[in-house]
Image: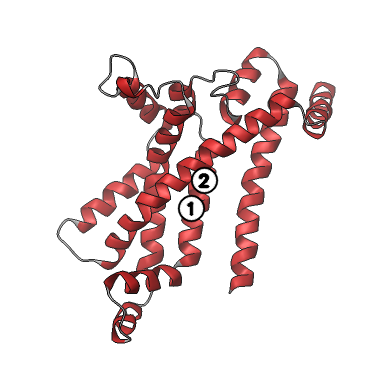
Amino acid sequence: MNEIIDGLIKAFQLIFSGDPRVMEITLRALYVSGAATLIATLWGIPIALILGLENFRGKFLIKGIFNALLGIPTVGLGLILFLLLSKSGPAGFLSMLYAPTGMIVGEAILITPIVISLATNAIESIDPETINQAKTLGANQSQASLTVLREAFAGVTLACVASFNRAIAELGVAQMVGGNIAGQTEVLTTAISTETAKGNIELSIALAIILLTLVFAITITTNVYQRRRK
């Protein structure tokens, strides 16, 4: 019990002293996960709009695939990306393995189903008459779609927040594609895993505290903002 208390005390000392390594790992994790979320949002929201507003053959199959991919094992996806991005793989020429770029792309692929599935559900929950009313007032298809997107803002925001939380908290893709190279690809989750294995419990606890604080703070802030917006 004393070891745990001592570990917590030293962990807080690392955080509040602004330990350079702790800050570096945290900032890199925010950068990688933030960039991945942005990319997943940029290509995921248009797909969600199509799935939410259009009717076409195979729509339910596509939605089913994205829903199934919500539970994809991160280590499995990490292995696939490792094989693709390795020097002998088809995408090895991109030199993204063991680099932040590869981690960003990998996490963006991982969280895309979350963006699409949750945003599609939010868009489908909007009254279908909304788009008809917008068109009646002279809006074209793109403008009408944006109107629906604004109405579904709360649900779409939740999709983005959930995606970011999944990205910053995942381990498989970051470990296998990034390699946890100190000073280059080390992020919160990979550092926690590695430092715990090394017995550096104080640093592991400090990083875990930061990770949990970020996830809870972002989620709570989003909920408060949505309440005030309503």
Single out the residue that lies furthest toward the left.
57
* 10 relative position to 59: left or right: right
Q: Is residue 125 visible?
A: no
**Residue 169 at what x, y percent from top left?**
55, 37
Q: Characterize the local packing of mark 1: few (<14), some (14-19) or many (20 or more) Cα atoms within 10 angstroms.
A: many
Q: Position of residue 196 (x, y in %)?
A: 65, 19
What is the three-letter code of the residue carrying label 2? Phe
- Tell me, for residue 164, which label it has, or none: 2
Say whether marks 2 and 1 touch (CB < 8 Å): yes
Instruction: Check the picture and name the quadrant holding the C terminus.
Output: bottom right
Total marks in image: 2
Q: Residue at x 30, y 55 (%)?
A: 47
In the displayed structure, would residue 28 be above or below residue 99? below
Kindly identify the residue that appears in the image at 23 percent across and 57 percent down: 60
| Closest to the observer, 117 or 41 | 41
Residue linked to disc 1: 160
Quadrant including the N terminus = top right
**Residue 164 x %, y %:** 52, 45
Q: Is residue 75 visible?
A: yes
Residue at the image point whose x is 70% and y is 28% from the top: 22
